[in-house]
């Protein structure tokens, strides 16, 4: 299947203009994007060659109740390569990417679709997109295409799922892809699509639509709106809009960010431990004896200002934490968080958060990071079948951003008259009254995890240079991690855990948890004392049989927490192997 896909790859939301202005739906969609690359003759996208994929969803259980169809209002080229017309929900349910050439049809509406994908010269208008797809015309079109009666469609029992679609040349072949399909295709091609079409497939297409409010199991997107994003981020967050048909009473809501295995949300790391604030779906996992940050996203039904702020109360394993003076504009949201320290022993902790009379609860698992100590190396060890494994590609999140609302009073003085008759004339005894309002500012923060690491021969190695040693000897490591941010210390932690993997084990099976020395501004890591060392050196011994050449290690650095999730970086380091320790020994007969 991979070869087949590779072959094919080588060949929201209401109404304007002549359309009825009657809005029948409520659009849950926002968008971003921006500048485009210049493209080439075989890899390019022409602005305007775009459309949308439409699917009807049942409100009660979020299941798909119609086949999906694509809408576009330009003349498509012949023989469009595609992966079928399938929704984001279908792929989440386990559908695999299936390539096909031709046999692709679109619905061409009478009234033109507004611009969907932003370009370097023109930004798409999310308000126009909402007006169009929330309109009576667009909803009637969906009803006609799906066979669902119009009155039934707008009854409140259904939602309309909308996904952006782009039509473009890739390696000289013309393709139709939704944002979700493009991300899946790029995963199979190991970055081959992104390397040629990043401005379209990994920025402007997926960022053209995302949710303002959580729905259908997808979180609202609050990340960067103008930079390229990862495949996991696209699959988990982007390229989606929703039209609803119920007049729901909007109330203050909150949610714990969904744990996942990557993509910049919360949180996920590693191929061995498998959790940041994640693990298996629905799990929140922390490590023992660690500073962590737990956050919830709070949605405001009305304006909360300094005169009427929100208060959040966290209860973590019986300990109480209170966050006061939370201000949020009407219909906006923000993350609210606490920093706390996990217990020193593995256990499960209940976390309960109450905001505005609503309470949410999750169970957090506290796990211990344990060594999987390599065996004692022997002088007669052999591995004649050894072949070097490629460095593993694990999930990384070395840059996260979030924001906090603040409010300041905007004075607006108005004269209020109070006329009084004195008997001979009227006198105005009025006064100036400040009828101002609060101006809100969204203060953005960003945190980056910077890593510097080296490996070098242990001090006990008799013949060595800084970057070279013989197999059979031990080496040490020095790893420094630092958070770079303008946020206050209450909003982040330094990196607190690190695990190193080794090439002689194929970066699997055995690994070492590094000793940490965490300070306010940085974290320093090195090996623990090696119990197999005569001198208890803080070293790892290379096997005597390791072949000459580069010896590369891979290290995970994690448990650097922010309100937006856990920062994690994978770092490689290397040292040259030349010869083995036997060459440092000379055996000769004893002279008498």
Image (cartoon, rainbow, N blue to C red):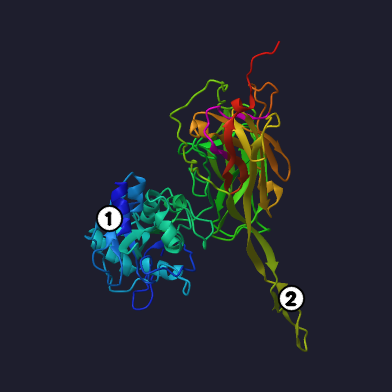
Horizontal side, residue 384 vs residue 465: left or right? left
Secondary structure at badge 2 equals: strand
Horizontal side, residue 336 vs residue 67: left or right? right
Q: Which residue was labeled with disc 2?
A: 432
The 10 Å Cα crowd at callout 1, few under 14, some 14 to 19, many 20 or more, is: many
> Which residue is located at x 63 percent, y 19 percent?
587
> Which residue is located at x 57 percent, y 39 percent?
556
Res 11 quadrant in image: bottom left
Horizontal side, residue 7 vs residue 351: left or right? left
For residue 108, the mark is: none
Which residue is at the front of the view, 404 or 320? 404
For residue 84, the mark is: 1
Q: Nearer the viewer, mark 2 or mark 1?
A: 1
Regarding residue 388, the answer to whether it shows in the image is yes
Q: Position of residue 99 (x, y in %)?
A: 28, 53
Which residue is at the front of the view, 248 or 369? 369
Q: Taking 482 as reference, is 49 above or below it?
A: below
> Which residue is located at x 38 percent, y 75 percent?
16
Q: Position of residue 426 (x, y in %)?
A: 74, 86
* Farthest-out residue, front: 592
Q: Position of residue 414 (x, y in %)?
A: 69, 77
Q: Disc 2 to disc 1, how far (Cα)?
A: 66 Å
Is disc 2 in contact with disc 1, using a CB cutoff of under 8 Å? no
Is residue 350 within the magenta segment?
Answer: no
Q: Which residues are magenta?
A: 538-555
* Farthest-out residue, top: 592
The 10 Å Cα crowd at callout 2, few under 14, some 14 to 19, many 20 or more, is: few
Secondary structure at badge 1 equals: loop
Q: Quadrant location of the C terminus?
A: top right
Q: Earlier in the sequence, mark 2 or mark 1?
A: 1
Q: Taking 478 as reference, is 563 above or below it?
A: below
């Amino acid at each position: 299947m991979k070869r087949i896909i590779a072959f094919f790859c080588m060949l929201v939301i209401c109404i304007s203009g002549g359309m009825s202005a009657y809005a029948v739906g409520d659009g849950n969609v926002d968008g971003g994007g921006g500048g485009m690359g210049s493209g080439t003759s075989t890899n390019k996208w022409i602005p305007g060659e775009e459309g949308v994929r439409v699917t009807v969803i049942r409100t009660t259980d979020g299941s798909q109740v119609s086949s999906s169809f694509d809408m576009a209002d330009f003349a498509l080229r012949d023989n469009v390569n595609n992966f079928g017309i399938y929704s984001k929900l279908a792929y989440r349910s386990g559908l695999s990417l299936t390539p096909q050439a031709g046999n692709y049809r679109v619905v061409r509406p009478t009234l033109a679709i507004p611009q969907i994908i932003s370009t370097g010269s023109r930004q798409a208008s999310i308000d126009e997109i909402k007006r169009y797809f929330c309109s009576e015309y667009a909803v009637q079109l969906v009803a006609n295409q799906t066979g669902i009666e119009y009155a039934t469609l707008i009854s409140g029992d259904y939602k309309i799922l909308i996904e952006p679609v782009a039509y473009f040349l890739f390696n000289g072949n013309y393709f139709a892809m939704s944002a979700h399909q493009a991300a899946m295709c790029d995963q199979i091609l190991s970055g081959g699509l992104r390397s040629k079409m990043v401005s379209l497939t990994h920025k402007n297409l997926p960022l053209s639509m995302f949710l303002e409010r959580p729905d259908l199991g997808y979180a609202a997107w609050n990340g960067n709106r103008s930079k390229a994003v990862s495949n996991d981020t696209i699959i988990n967050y982007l390229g989606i809009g929703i039209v609803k048909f119920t007049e729901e009473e909007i109330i203050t809501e909150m949610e714990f960010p969904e744990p996942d295995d990557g993509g910049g949300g919360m949180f996920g790391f590693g191929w061995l431990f498998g959790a940041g604030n994640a693990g298996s779906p629905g799990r929140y996992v922390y490590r023992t004896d660690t500073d962590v940050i737990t956050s919830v996203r709070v949605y405001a039904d009305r304006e909360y200002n300094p005169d009427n702020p929100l208060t959040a109360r966290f209860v973590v394993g019986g300990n109480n934490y209170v966050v006061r003076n939370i201000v949020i504009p009407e219909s906006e949201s923000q993350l609210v968080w606490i920093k706390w320290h996990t217990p020193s022993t593995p256990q499960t902790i209940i976390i309960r958060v109450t905001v505005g009379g609503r309470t949410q609860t999750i169970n957090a698992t506290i796990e211990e990071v344990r060594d999987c100590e390599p065996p004692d190396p022997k002088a007669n060890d052999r591995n004649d079948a050894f072949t070097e494994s490629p460095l593993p590609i694990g999930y990384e999140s070395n840059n996260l951003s979030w924001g906090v609302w603040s409010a300041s009073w905007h004075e607006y003085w108005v004269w209020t008259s109070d006329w009084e008759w004195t008997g001979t004339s009227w006198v105005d005894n009025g006064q100036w009254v400040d009828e101002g309002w609060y101006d809100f500012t969204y203060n953005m923060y960003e945190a980056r995890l910077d890593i510097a690491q080296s490996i070098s021969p242990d001090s006990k190695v008799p013949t060595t240079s800084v970057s070279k040693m013989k197999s059979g000897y031990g080496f040490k490591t020095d790893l420094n991690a630092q958070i770079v941010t303008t946020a206050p210390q209450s909003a982040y932690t330094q990196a607190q855990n690190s695990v190193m993997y080794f090439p002689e084990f194929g970066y699997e099976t055995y690994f070492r948890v590094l000793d940490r020395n965490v300070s306010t501004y940085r974290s320093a890591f090195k090996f623990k004392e090696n119990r197999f060392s005569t001198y208890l050196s803080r070293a790892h011994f290379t096997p005597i049989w390791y072949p000459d050449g580069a010896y590369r290690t891979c290290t995970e650095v994690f448990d650097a927490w922010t309100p937006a999730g856990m920062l994690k970086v994978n770092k490689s380091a290397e040292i040259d192997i030349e010869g083995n320790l036997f060459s440092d020994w000379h055996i000769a007969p004893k002279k008498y």
